[in-house]
Amino acid sequence: MKLAIDAMGGDYAPEKIVQGVELARDKYTDLKFILYGKEEKIKEVLKNGERITIVHTDSVIEMGDEPVRAVRQKKTSSLVLAAQAVKDGKADALFSAGNTGALLAASLFIIGRIKGVDRPGMTTTLPALKGPEDSFTMLDVGANAESKVKNLHQFAVLGNFYSANVMGVTSPRIGLLNNGTEEDKGDPLHKEAYQVLSQDPNLNFIGNVESRELLNGAADVIVTDGFTGNAVLKNTEGTALSMLKLLKETILNAGVQGKLGGLLLKPAFKTVQNKMDYSKHGGAVLLGVKAPVVKAHGSSNEIQVSHALRQLRSMVTTNLTKNLADYFASRPTDEN
Amino acid sequence: MKLAIDAMGGDYAPEKIVQGVELARDKYTDLKFILYGKEEKIKEVLKNGERITIVHTDSVIEMGDEPVRAVRQKKTSSLVLAAQAVKDGKADALFSAGNTGALLAASLFIIGRIKGVDRPGMTTTLPALKGPEDSFTMLDVGANAESKVKNLHQFAVLGNFYSANVMGVTSPRIGLLNNGTEEDKGDPLHKEAYQVLSQDPNLNFIGNVESRELLNGAADVIVTDGFTGNAVLKNTEGTALSMLKLLKETILNAGVQGKLGGLLLKPAFKTVQNKMDYSKHGGAVLLGVKAPVVKAHGSSNEIQVSHALRQLRSMVTTNLTKNLADYFASRPTDEN
C-alpha cells in the first residue's frame, strides 16, 4: 500500500512530517510512501530512505493562500502532485497537514467525489469520557458552510460506515446535533433531517443530541451541519485547553502547597490529558471522496502525523472508500 | 423597585427561589418582591415577609409543557401572572427559573418587544480567562432557532448596550462568531452580517471570532445566531463539566498519592471552579423586550437566584430597557 504525502504542509513541515512517516514506516511493513516537496529539505531530516520515494517540487501552497485559486494555479505544488498521484492510481491515499481549504479543493477537483455523495464531510474523532466506547465520530466539522437535509443524511451514512469499519463500533448509534432532544427541536433543516434520519432503516438513529452531552458519549456518530460542527469542535478544543491552562496557572500560583500538590498529581493530570487528546485517533478525514484523505492539525508533531498515517492505512485496509462507493451506488438518490 | 417572581419555576422551587429572594432582600434595601405561586408552600420556606408580597395561584407551567400553548391556556399560572404584573406596571422586572420557552413566550406575548427589535435575544455572560475583562456577553444563545442578518445586527446593538451599561465595559469589543477570522468566512448569513456590523458606526466591531477563542476573552460581546449560540453555550458547559469530573475521578483513582495531591490542591481547584462559574453574573437575560427579564438555570440554588435578582436590579437601576427603547426609536429600520 502506498501513501501520497504532502511533505510541505503544516507548521513544522517537512521535519515533523518526515519523522512521522519514518515512525509509521518502521511500525507497518506494508506501507510505502511518496513524499512530495523540496527534496533537499526532506533529505536533511530523513534518516532512512527505505520504502520512501521523494518527488521533488519547489512549489508549495501556503496557509494564507486562497484555497481554490491555489489548487488551480499551483499545479506542481506538493499538495496538488500528491492528490494527482492518488487520482492516477500511483498511491492509495492522501495525507496533508497544510491548508485545509486547499486539501478540500484538491480532493474534490482532482480525486473527485464518490457518486451519490453531494458534499463530502470533514470527519473527526473525539473522546467519549462515558458510555460504551472511548471515542465518537463527528461530521461535518467544516467542509461545508451550508448544508441541506440530503447532506446531513449523507453525513450520517458516511459516519456510520466510518464508525463501523474504522473505529470498530457495532451498529453505531447515530445522533443529530440539535438545540434540544425533542424531535420537533431546531430550525427547519434540523427538524426535517430528524425525520429523514429516523426513516432510514439502515441507520441506528437515536435522535437529537445536545452539545452538552457530546463528551459523555451520547452517540457514536454525531451528525451536524459544517457551520455548527465547526463551532462545536473548536469550542471543545478551546474550552478544554483553557481549563487545563487555567488549572496549571492556578497551581503555579498556589505557593509551595500548590507545587507539591501539582507534583503528586502529575500522573493524574497526564491521564486526563491523554484521555482528552484525540489526535491519537488520527486527523480529520474527508469522507465522501474516492480515496482516503486525512488532514492532520497544522501543529502536529511526528507522533500525531504517524497516528494519521495509521488511520489512512486502516481506511485502505478495510477498503472503506470502495465499500462506500458500492453502498452509494445501490442507494436511492436523496431528494431533498 | 419591585420584582415579579415566578416562585414555582425551577427544579428546587419554591424553596431555593424563596431563599434567593430573601438573600437579595437582605442585601438590597431598595428591593421589593411579589412572589407568584402556591402560598402555603412559599410560606413553609419564607423566614421573614419583609418587603415580600405573595400572590397565591395553584396553576403552574411545568418543564414539559409546550411553551406557547401553556402561556395561552394557563392564564393564572405563576409565570403568566408575574409577566402580567410587569405589563401592568405593578412590577419593574420579571424573574423565572422555569420553562425557558414559556418565559420567552410570556415575555413576547404579555410584556412585548421593544419597537424596532424584531427578535429579542437570549443573552448570557461567560468567563473570560484572559483579556481586559473577566467576562463576556454572548447572544443569541437560543431564543431563536433561525436568524436573519437584521436579527444579528440587532443582537449586536442589544449586546453592546448590555455590556456597556450592566457589565460596565467601555466601548465593548463586538465580535461575530464565525468559522474563521477572515471577513469572507461563513455562510451567506454570516458573510453579510460581517459587512453590516462593520458599517455600523455605533459599534466597536472587531471582526469574526472563532469559538476556540471565546474563553480567551477575544471579544466583550459575541454575536451569534441562536442555533450556533445554543450549541456553543451548551458545549462550553458540557466540556468544562466533563473535564472537572474526569479530573476528580482520576484523582480519586490515583491511590494515596492522588488523594494527598488532591487535598493539597483543593484551594486551587476551588479557584478554577469559581472562575468557570458564570452563574455569579446572574442568569440569561432576554434582551429586546420592554422590561428586564431574567431566566436562571433550572437547577439554581439560592445563591444563584440572588445573583440573578441583583442582575435584574442593576438593569432596572441603569434604566436599560428604556434606554434601549429610546435608541431603537431613533435608529433607522433594518432592511435585511
Image (cartoon, coloured by chain):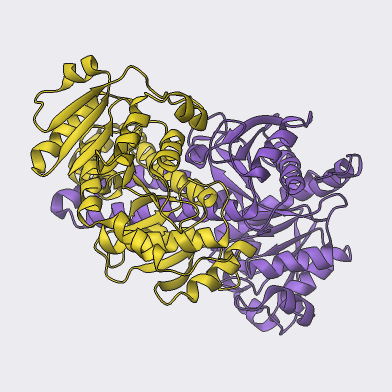
Chain colours: A purple, B yellow
The answer to which quarter of the image holds residue B5 is top left
Q: Residue furthest front?
A: B88
Q: Is residue B74 above or below residue B203?
A: above
Q: How many numbered marks are there?
A: 0
Residue A204 is situated, as x and y percent measured from the top left of the image, at 70, 29
**Viewer-side residue, B210 vs A163:** B210
Position of the C terminus of chain A by quadrant: top right
Position of the N terminus of chain A by quadrant: bottom right
Residue A65 is situated, as x and y percent measured from the top left of the image, at 64, 79
Is A335 on the left or on the right of B125, as rendered? right
**Does the image show residue A26?**
no
Q: Residue furthest right?
A: A330
Is A207 on the left or on the right of B170, as rendered? right
Residue B120 is situated, as x and y percent measured from the top left of the image, at 44, 51
The answer to which quarter of the image holds residue A95 is bottom right
**Viewer-side residue, A191 vs A22:** A191
Please name the residue shown 40% across and 63% down the image.
Answer: B328
**Viewer-side residue, B182 vs B169:** B169
Please name the residue shown 88% across and 39% down the image.
Answer: A331
Residue A167 is situated, as x and y percent measured from the top left of the image, at 66, 40
Is A150 on the left or on the right of B217, as rendered? right
**Viewer-side residue, A84 vs B91:** B91
Is A130 on the left or on the right of B190, as rendered? left
Q: Is residue B69 above or below residue B164?
A: above
Please name the residue shown 64% across and 64% down the image.
Answer: B188
**Does the image show residue A82?**
yes
